[in-house]
Amino acid sequence: MKALLIIDVQNDFLPGGSLAVAGGDAILPVINRISDRFDLVVASQDWHPPGHKSFASNHAGRQVFEEIDLHGLAQTLWPDHCVQASQGAEFSPQLDMCPVEAIFRKGTDREIDSYSAFHDNGHRKSTGLADYLRGKDIDSVYLTGLAGDICVYFTALDALAEGFSTTIITDGCKPFDESDFNHKLTELKSRGLKVVTSAELEQTLPST
């Protein structure tokens, strides 16, 4: 059984958002086109409380994209983004949410960031996604979303560690840094990751 994971396709990560991925909106038609080829579709949603410690605005004298130590973990300081109940936290209105069966919110603890859809950055708490997928008899996950080199990457890393066959749909993702993303794909492939384009996927997975 195969699941499509849609990672953080939210307004703040799209052009015009506070932490926009350049060209991020190009993945929307790709995701919409392929979502009917999976047994299950789920989405993750960055859902930060106001005053989240990953925001540079909560650290006097610090600048956006500086790195600090936050409770023993390296933490990049971000612009305020995906604040709970804000317009920026909403999914893109151009994303077809009808196939999405469940939404897993992450980054809800003010004291720790959460890039992966499976765990926070310290692996201190689970989102429950792995158990949910197993409960649905899922053994293979396919990843799309934003940003490819951060939240998609860390979700893929955890998916592999959880024992799922893991595939990234390359044109269904968009990174902040293309070179960094390619480097991370190489690393993930050494751990068993598979990569496909949406066109290749459509040749092998029939519509349900």
Image (cartoon, rainbow, N blue to C red):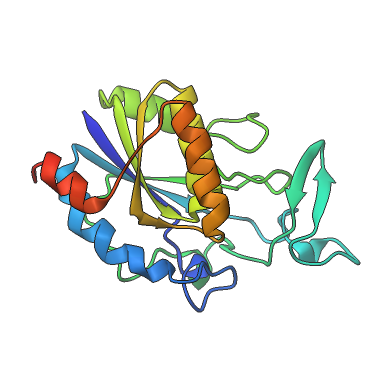
Q: Position of residue 153 (x, y in %)?
A: 51, 43
Q: Quadrant of residue 58?
A: bottom right
Residue ID at (29%, 24%): 139
Residue ID at (52%, 64%): 85
Instruction: Tell which of 153 and 162 is nearer to you.
Output: 153
- Residue furthest to the right in view is 61
Q: Position of residue 24 (x, y in %)?
A: 43, 67
Q: Quadrant of residue 31?
A: bottom left
Q: In this rendering, would 11 be left or right of 114?
A: left
Q: Position of residue 71 (x, y in %)?
A: 82, 38
- Up-down: is 118 above or below 74? above
Instruction: Tell which of 192 and 29 is nearer to you.
Output: 192
The quarter of the picture where the C terminus appears is top left
- Up-down: is 114 above or below 171? above
The answer to whether one can see residue 207 in this image is yes
The answer to whether one can see residue 97 in this image is no
Q: Position of residue 179 (x, y in %)?
A: 55, 55
- Residue furthest to the bottom in view is 16
Q: In this rendering, would 112 be left or right of 170?
A: right
Instruction: Tell which of 84 and 150 is nearer to you.
Output: 150
Number of numbered discs present?
0
Q: Quadrant of residue 168?
A: top left
Residue ID at (79%, 59%): 66
The quarter of the picture where the N terminus appears is top left
